[in-house]
Image (cartoon, helix red, strand yellow):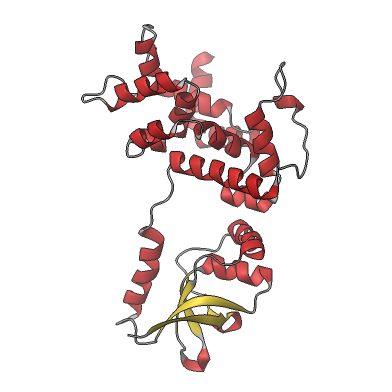
C-alpha cells in the first residue's frame, strides 16, 4: 500500500456519492478561513484512477471551500488505487473519519473561543471593526464589558461564519462568561457531565471562585451531595430545596421562547390534544 502527500488538481477529484451532504454555510465559513490562513488539514483521496481522476475519501467541506476561494489544487493525502481491499474498506475509512473524533464539549469550546479572542486581540489590537447598537443590552451602569467584547469579536466574522461556527454575539458572550471559571475548577470538572452542560456552567460562572469550589466539591462527592449547581447553592445558603418542576413546565418554558411560526407548527403536530382540551373547556 502506497500513501503519499501532494497537491491534487481540484478538477480531477470526484466528490460524488458522499455519506454527508456538504452544507453551504460550513463551506463558506471554511472558505473565509482558507483565504486568511490556508488549509489546516489535508483532504484524503484514492488515485489516480481511470482517466487520471481521484476519488475523495474525506474532506468534502474542505474541497468545497477550496473551490469557493478559487484554488486550482488542494493539499491531499493520496492512497494508491490498491490501498483498500474493496469499496467497503474505503467507505469505512470515511465513516471512521466522521465518527472517531472527539468534539469539544461546552467547557472546552468556551475556553477555546475565549482564547481565540484573546490571541486575536493581542495580534490585532483592540477589536473595533464594526459597531452595532448595544443599547438594548446596556444596563443602568453601562454596557457589560463581556457583552461588548462579544459583539466586537462577532463582528469580525461574516454572517455565514457566525452561523456555521456558532460565533454570534450571544454564543461568544456565553463562552467568555464560562471561560472566567478558574483553571483549577475547570480541571476538576473536565471529565464529568458538568463540563458538557452549558446551562450549568453559566450558573457556576456566576458564583465566586470560593463558592465554585464548594459547588463542584458537592457535585463530585461520592455519593454526590448535589446533582446540580442550583441544588448545591441551596445547600450552601441553607435554602429550602426548590420544588421539582413537572415535565409540562419544561415544555412550556421551551414553547414560550419559540417563534410564532414554530409555535403554530407545534399546535399542528398536537392538534388532536388541542381540540380535546378546547372541548373540555366548553
Q: Nearer the viewer, residue 134 or 98?
A: 134
Vertical arrangement, residue 25 with respect to residue 16, above or below: above
Q: Left of 147 or right of it: where is 244? A: left
Give the image location of residue 238, x and y in percent: 36, 6
Q: Left of 74 or right of it: where is 91? A: left
Q: Residue furthest left?
A: 222
Give the image location of residue 250, x and y in percent: 45, 24
Vertical arrangement, residue 272 with respect to residue 75, above or below: above
Quadrant in the picture for residue 144:
top right
Q: Nearer the viewer, residue 168 or 253?
A: 168
Quadrant in the picture for residue 145:
top right
Q: Nearer the viewer, residue 59 or 280?
A: 59
Q: Left of 168 or right of it: where is 250? A: left
Please report the residue visible at 63 percent of the width from the left and 33 percent of the height from the top: 259
Q: Is residue 75 visible?
A: yes
Please report the residue visible at 40 percent of the width from the left and 38 percent of the height from the top: 196
Give the image location of residue 28, x and y in percent: 64, 60
Q: Is residue 245 visible?
A: no
Q: Residue furthest bottom?
A: 51
Vertical arrangement, residue 259 with respect to residue 31, above or below: above
Quadrant in the picture for residue 148:
top right
Please report the residue visible at 49 percent of the width from the left and 83 percent of the height from the top: 54
Vertical arrangement, residue 44 with respect to residue 244, above or below: below
Please report the residue visible at 38 percent of the width from the left and 57 percent of the height from the top: 101
Give the image location of residue 223, x and y in percent: 21, 24
Q: Nearer the viewer, residue 277 or 117?
A: 117
How many numbered callouts?
0
Q: From the image, which quarter does the C terminus lie in?
A: top right
Q: From the image, which quarter does the N terminus lie in?
A: bottom left
Amino acid at each position: 500500500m502506497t500513501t503519499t502527500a501532494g497537491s491534487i488538481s481540484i478538477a480531477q477529484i470526484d466528490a460524488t456519492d458522499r455519506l454527508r451532504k456538504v452544507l453551504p454555510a460550513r463551506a463558506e465559513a471554511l472558505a473565509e478561513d482558507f483565504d486568511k490562513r490556508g488549509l489546516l488539514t489535508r483532504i484524503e483521496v484514492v488515485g489516480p484512477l481511470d482517466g487520471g481522476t481521484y476519488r475523495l475519501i474525506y474532506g468534502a467541506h474542505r474541497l468545497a471551500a477550496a473551490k469557493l476561494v478559487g484554488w486550482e489544487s488542494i493539499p491531499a493525502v493520496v492512497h494508491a488505487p490498491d490501498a483498500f481491499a474493496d469499496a467497503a474498506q474505503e467507505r469505512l475509512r470515511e465513516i471512521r473519519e466522521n465518527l472517531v473524533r472527539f468534539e469539544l464539549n461546552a467547557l472546552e469550546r468556551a475556553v477555546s473561543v475565549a482564547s481565540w479572542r484573546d490571541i486575536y486581540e493581542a495580534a490585532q489590537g483592540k477589536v473595533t471593526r464594526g459597531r452595532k447598537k448595544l443599547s438594548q443590552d446596556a444596563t443602568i451602569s453601562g454596557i457589560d464589558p463581556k457583552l461588548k467584547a462579544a459583539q466586537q469579536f462577532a463582528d469580525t466574522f461574516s454572517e455565514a461564519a457566525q452561523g456555521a461556527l456558532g460565533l454570534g454575539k450571544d454564543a461568544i458572550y456565553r463562552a467568555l462568561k464560562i471561560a472566567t471559571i478558574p483553571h483549577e475548577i475547570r480541571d476538576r470538572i473536565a471529565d464529568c457531565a458538568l463540563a458538557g452542560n452549558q446551562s450549568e456552567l453559566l450558573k457556576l460562572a456566576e458564583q465566586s471562585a470560593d463558592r465554585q469550589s464548594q459547588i463542584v466539591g458537592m457535585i463530585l462527592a461520592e455519593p454526590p451531595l448535589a446533582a446540580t449547581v442550583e441544588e448545591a447553592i441551596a445547600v450552601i445558603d441553607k435554602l429550602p430545596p426548590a420544588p421539582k418542576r413537572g415535565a409540562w413546565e419544561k415544555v412550556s418554558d421551551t414553547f414560550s421562547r419559540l417563534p410564532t411560526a414554530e409555535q403554530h407548527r407545534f399546535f399542528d403536530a398536537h392538534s388532536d390534544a388541542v381540540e380535546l382540551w378546547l372541548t373540555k373547556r366548553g
